[in-house]
Amino acid sequence: MNQPDILQPRVINTFMKRKTHMNKNAELALSDPIFAPYLVNNGTGMGNLEGINDLRALFQDTPNGGDAPLTLEIGFGLGDSLIEMATNDKDRNFIGIEVHEPGIGKAAFMAHEKNLTNIKIINGDAITLLSQLPSNHIDRIQLYFPDPWQKKRHHKRRFVSPERMALVTRVLKSGGWFHTATDWEHYAFWMVEVLDEMPNLHNQAGRGNFTDRPNFRPLTKFERRGIDRGHGVWDLIYVKD
Ligand SMILES: C[S@@+](CC[C@H](N)C(=O)[O-])C[C@H]1O[C@@H](n2cnc3c(N)ncnc32)[C@H](O)[C@@H]1O
């Protein structure tokens, strides 16, 4: 008789894969090989992250090379702010990871349109990716307007948790940054509480404090929507020892 697989712990995802409309440009970017240089793995379905364990190597044959400063954006949504950052800082390499297919396609489309050579897009779960990267690998990790998971029974899905932040800290280089921002007050205070207790991370603004939005962070789509609804915005920047 088949035994139920009671020993397998259930994976708690920080995302919910949404089925939303994919525009023509995004669809084209996910199917036409001219966009392939921007897409590290399969852009549709759940991304296969097998073998992606060195992000710097992805830039080996680009003008910046693999040793340039490297930023990883987790959950870039539709990618407008990530593309803007990559356009404004051409000497830095950027990698965005998302599970939302229309966003993956749109970001690859915009990167090609702007002829960028300093950006790559990965389809998949950032937690899996972080788990398989080497320690001391990335200069900056950014997480802008993560899903707030407002209901108490969903708080365990919040990206900012001690366990998930341990993965982020391990992968950051010494002197590297973790930058996050939210428009949900409850999540903002939750974040500062979790992050202030992380060994090896230091709140740039001092324990318990938030920081002003740095001018290199463009307004994101979710941020604009939050502001329109009367929400505040809280930024946090932590530096690794
Ligand atoms: C609320 S949206 C914010 C999007 C964008 N940063 C913005 O501000 O407009 C959060 C995004 O994070 C993505 N996400 C959540 N958990 C993720 C994970 N573990 N790996 C990759 N993407 C994730 C979701 O798919 C979603 O698109």
Image (cartoon, rainbow, N blue to C red):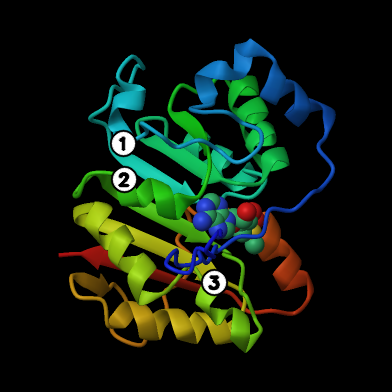
* Residue 157 tag number: 3
Q: Earlier in the sequence, mark 1 or mark 3?
A: 1
Q: Earlier in the sequence, mark 2 or mark 3?
A: 2
Q: Note whether 64 is above or below 21 in the view shown.
A: above
Q: Note whether 44 is above or below 211 in the view shown.
A: above
The quarter of the picture where the N terminus appears is: bottom right
- Looking at the image, residue 84 sits to the left or right of residue 71; the answer is right
Residue designated by label 2: 132
Task: Measure how far apart labels 2 and 3 are at the Cα level.
Answer: 20 Å
Label 3 neighbourhood size at 10 Å, few (<14), some (14-19), many (20+)? some
Does residue 219 appear anywhere in the picture? Answer: no
Task: Measure how far apart labels 1 and 2 are at the Cα level.
Answer: 6 Å
Task: Measure how far apart labels 1 and 3 are at the Cα level.
Answer: 24 Å
The percent coordinates of residue 80 (x first, y second) are 64, 43
* Residue 115 tag number: none
Q: Secondary structure at mark 2?
A: helix
Check disc 3 and give the amino acid type: Arg
Q: Secondary structure at mark 3?
A: helix
Image quadrant of residue 147? bottom right
The percent coordinates of residue 35 (x first, y second) are 61, 18
Can you tell me which quadrant of the image ligand 1 is in? bottom right
Which residue is most to the front? 1
Check disc 2 and give the amino acid type: Gln
* Residue found 27% across the figure and 83% down from its top: 197
The percent coordinates of residue 186 (x first, y second) are 57, 87
Q: Do the residues bearing badges 1 and 2 touch, measured as CB atoms within 8 Å?
A: yes
The quarter of the picture where the C terminus appears is: bottom left
Residue designated by label 1: 53
* Residue found 50% across the figure and 50% down from its top: 125
